[in-house]
Image (cartoon, rainbow, N blue to C red):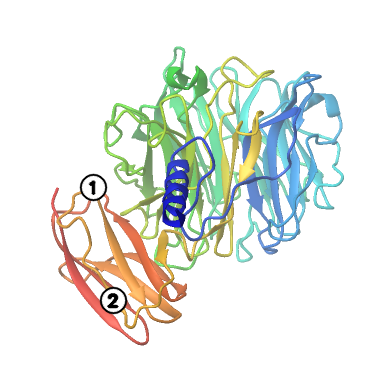
Amino acid sequence: MKKTLIKLLLIFLIGNCFSQNRYYFLVGIGPNFRIFPSTITSQSETDIVSHPFNPNIMFASAITINSLTGFKSEGVYVTTNGGLNWFGSDTCYGNPIFNHGGDPGPAIDKDGRFFLSHIGTFITGMFCHYSTNNGLNWSNAATIASGDMDKGDITSDAVPSSPFFGRTYISYIAFTPPYRVFLAYTTNGGVSWVSGIPINNPPQRCQGSEVKTDLNGNVLVTWASTIPLSPFTEDFVGFAKSTNGGANWIVNENIYDMNGIQGILTQKRNIRVNGLPRMDVDLTNGPRSGWIYIITTEKNLPPAGNDPDIIMHRSTDGGNTWSNGIRVNQDPLNNGKIQYFPAIRVDDQGGINIVYYDDRRTSSDSAEVFLSRSTDGGNTWTDYPISDHRFAPKPISGGAVGYQGDNIGVTSVNNFLWPLWMDDYSGIYQAWTVKIDLNSIGIKKINSATSSEYSLSQNYPNPFNSSTTIEFSIPENDLITIKIYDITGKEISTLINQSITAGKYSLQFSLHSELASGVYYYRMFSDKISITKSMVLIK
């Protein structure tokens, strides 16, 4: 009887791993939670940033719509203890309170000053508020630009050696012909702004600008140029660079072609989606210092398949040249599954972390959230489900036609990743997050039974053509490293490099299409042991 009950319990648990209920995780991924729960106010178009010098402080925002009154604003959600607790409000109380129209852009500068940019509701334009007390109080709105503006982005230069250290930038697009990209900046913490700096003279309509700075203080801006007719599908990506704080620009209107997904996703109850570019820069002093990564959502243009895929291009020379496209999500090509709304963060170790909605494990009308992570500049990727529940995307009441929000966000603090997305698992769209330990992610603990010796199993399947599983056991707590090498001994990828407890583990290695067929080696080592085995890739 006891064995039967145990079997039934296991069946129940396994079944729930793949149901609409919440399910378990790999090591390193914690439970999901709402950062500021509400039963009457929807939260969408989420974004999150971390303090450049205080790992305990993060600031998140979202478009908020009160379902009872229709009142619209931007949320202010703050943690000062590293994500353990959050406080704030679904309303930004910076005057004029009635004119908060969405497209929230949070930022934190070197002095810990918060910024929140947004477009207007009744008075059109691009506006920005600042707070000197962690979002408790806000300044009146500073007018960055008047007129119809499209989705701005904000960032602050937090590199002490930069000649523009502490300067905060906003990029935005005038939503009238010729749809140019503009820049604004402040040197005094948002008290006043230099604005209306034109960046480009576009041949086609621009949408979705993003701004970042690099280790040298250069200002980097990217955007999409679209076809001229509805649904204004993203056609190619533009990029501009300023080496003097925005005064002058080197502009390339077309760094590479794309075929975006702007329009309606019928599979997801007719929600509105886009393929707008997201960008981040490696600010470490590691081997890929200064590399720039741009991601988009595309289809019907290789390496994307005939369904929406996340595509990345990278520049290793400061934006002068760009790589071919790299397909980020590692599910089978052309499998009818949909990935959309990616966000990117390069962590403190130079790892690339891309989070997005995905339906590879769900029915076509549902979704969950995945992370694709690369520790070698995008050559190889491993995918992880990070949401512990599923939801059915649908338009948000009170928003525009088909509106589910236009983006999600992600940041990192030390070796922890904090994605922020919106879903209606709770019955109303809410901002959800999860704490991800980048030192442990990807390792699945099979059991805690203590082995008498170190062991490294043969990978399976072997040969393989997309991904393979590696199992290993350790008899005691140890700092374990597992690396992949090609036949010449060149390091391909580091799978783990961390302290783990005694037990048996498994991890997955996913290969990128740039790697050729052939023999590869995987090596597990610590101060106590070194074990090497071979595996065969057949494409």
Q: Secondary structure at mark 2?
A: strand
Q: Position of residue 496 (x, y in %)?
A: 39, 67
Residue 527 coordinates in the image, percent (x, y): 37, 86
Q: CA distance from mark 1 to mark 2?
A: 30 Å
Q: Residue 53, how many percent across, how many down?
A: 68, 64
Residue type of the residue flagged with mark 1: Ser
Vertical relation: 175 (above or below) 60 = above
Q: Give residue 184's mark.
A: none
Disc 1 + disc 2, Cβ < 8 Å? no
Q: Amino acid at mark 2?
A: Ser
Question: Which residue has dot 2 on it?
Answer: 455
Q: Is residue 130 visible?
A: yes
- Could you say which is closer to the camera, residue 74 or residue 331? 331
In the displayed structure image, the side of residue 30 where residue 439 appears, left or right: left
Q: Is residue 170 above or below residue 457?
A: above
In the depicted structure, whether residue 382 falls above or below residue 503: above
Q: Quadrant of residue 404?
A: top right
The residue lying at 22 percent from left, 75 percent from top is: 532
Q: Residue at x 47, y 75 (%)?
A: 501
For residue 272, side relative to residue 516 (left or right): right
Residue 145 in view of the camera: no
In depth, the one of 345 and 32 nearer the eye is: 32
**Residue 278 image position (x, y, % from top left):** 49, 40
Task: Check residue 513 in the rendering and tell me which mark sits there, or answer none.
Answer: 1
Quadrant in the rendering for residue 400: top right
Neighbour tally class for label 2: few under 14, some 14-19, many 20 plus, Cα within 10 Å: some
Q: Image height check: is 241 above or below 400?
A: below
Horizontal side of residue 175 vs 77, given as left or right: left
- Residue positioned 34% across, 47% down in the render: 321
Residue at screen point 36% across, 42% down: 329
